[in-house]
Image (cartoon, rainbow, N blue to C red):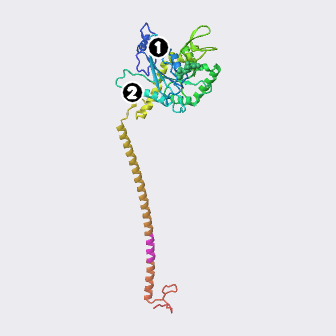
Amino acid sequence: LVPSQSAAASPVIRKKLMGFVGFSNLPNQVHRKSVRKGFQFTAMVVGESGLGKSTLINTLFNTKLYQPKEPLPPSAERPKTVAIESISADIEENGVRLRLTVVDTPGFGDFVNNDESWRPIVEDIESRFDQYLEYENKVNRQKVVDDRVHACLYFIQPTGHSLRPIDIEFMSRLHTRVNLIPVIAKADTMTDEEIADFKTRVLADIAFHKIHIFQAPTYENEDEESLAEAEEIASKIPFAVVGSDKIVTTPDGRQVRGRAYPWGVVEVDNEEHCDFVKLRQMLIRTYMEELREYTDDVLYENWRTEKLLSMGVVQDSTVFKEVNPAVRNHEERVMHEAKLAKMEAEMKMVFQQKVAEKEAKLKQSEEELYARHKEMKEALDKQRGDLEEKRRRIESGRPLTPEGKSSTGRKKGFLRT
Ligand code: GDP
């Protein structure tokens, strides 16, 4: 192998190995490590009570995580807000441990006024992000507990119409915080045709309101099988599900998980009867790790950026920098002072300009006055000269011309005493 100069600039050189080195075992190492450590997964279920949330979770994980709830007696005081309840269980399959936490939201949509039903749920999801951020900032980060919600199953009532305002409000508020997986509850209450129509309308509503729901990701260079699987899963969204943790006998004698009706049996694990299998495939078999990754890389990261920015941490092109509040205050004060100084200079300039204008005006009127004074003085001087001349002539006894000027000939009556 040619040693590379720099990772960014070096071209990828494909080489054939001469023998077995052993790094093809890396996936097994990762696998062994993951199995040893176990996995954590947190799923949230949201929807009105009675839509089959507890039943579906039990069906999905094939466990009695939820015990059937006793319905409240009519006289009992009903809760007035949405509650958040978490149940955790360690489940194991073929030696792989999964710490499953299910977050239930009893009360959602159950009140007369459901305007704010989404709020406690958003707060719960964000408080889990908060907690994770706190763990991350700890000096010792060995035992980070990841309580973040990795997926939210949103149960849509099988109305056959379209999404209701409460569904749109909830999904719009939550889609930037959690992987939304919409499911149509109790799909056995609708015919195949009704389900297909309902799905089309729900998807149109979701697209219209620009709600982002979790999509099975596809990657470049992916094999045909994976692409086909992703496409098939995507084609079933929103999943029309039927839940049941009971075993029933089909007319042909098979023991299946399903719901028995007088006219037949709805099989939960039969893809022709409902989308339960595809939902499980997406949530557990194929994309559990993708859901965890998307939560960490995108949803949590976006929330973290928003949070840090709101706390006064600024982001430059590559790294976050903490800003010391004292430094920020000083900078703000300097900026304020500079602004004041600029305003003062501007005011001074305007004042000087005004003074100069006034001075110029005064000078002009002074000159005008001076010119007028000079004119008057000259006129007076001239008048005085004329009078002087007159007096002299009179005194010398010379008569004045008819125009008032003196002449050499005397004229009677022209003389004044
Ligand atoms: P939750 O209040 O949403 O948790 O609902 P539950 O899981 O307690 O279910 C309420 C009722 O609906 C129970 O009687 C269930 O047996 C029933 N149920 C649950 N899932 C389904 C389903 O897929 N189809 C039908 N028809 N009924 C269901």
Q: Is residue 290 visible?
A: yes
Hey, which residue is sitting farthest bottom in the picture? Answer: 412
Q: Is residue 230 visible?
A: no
Work out which quarter of the rendered image holds the N terminus and state it: top left
Q: Is residue 139 left or right of residue 120?
A: left
Give the residue number, with chain letter if any, for mark 1. 14
Residue at coordinates 52% horizontally, 28% vertically from top-left?
Answer: 75
Residue at coordinates 50% horizontally, 90% vertically from top-left?
Answer: 414
Q: Is residue 219 left or right of residue 197?
A: left
**N-terminal label among 1 and 2:** 1
Hey, which residue is sitting farthest right in the picture? Answer: 193
Residue 134's disc number: 2
Could you tell me residue 133's position as x and y percent? 40, 27
Q: Nearer the viewer, residue 72 or 239?
A: 72
Which stretch is magenta? 371-380
Q: For the residues carrying marks 1 and 2, which lies nearer the camera in this image?
A: 2
Q: Amino acid at mark 1?
A: Arg
For disc 1, the neighbor class at 10 Å (few under 14, some 14 to 19, many from 20) is few
Could you tell me residue 395's position as x and y percent? 43, 88
Could you tell me residue 64's position as x and y percent? 49, 16
Q: Is residue 237 left or right of residue 349?
A: right
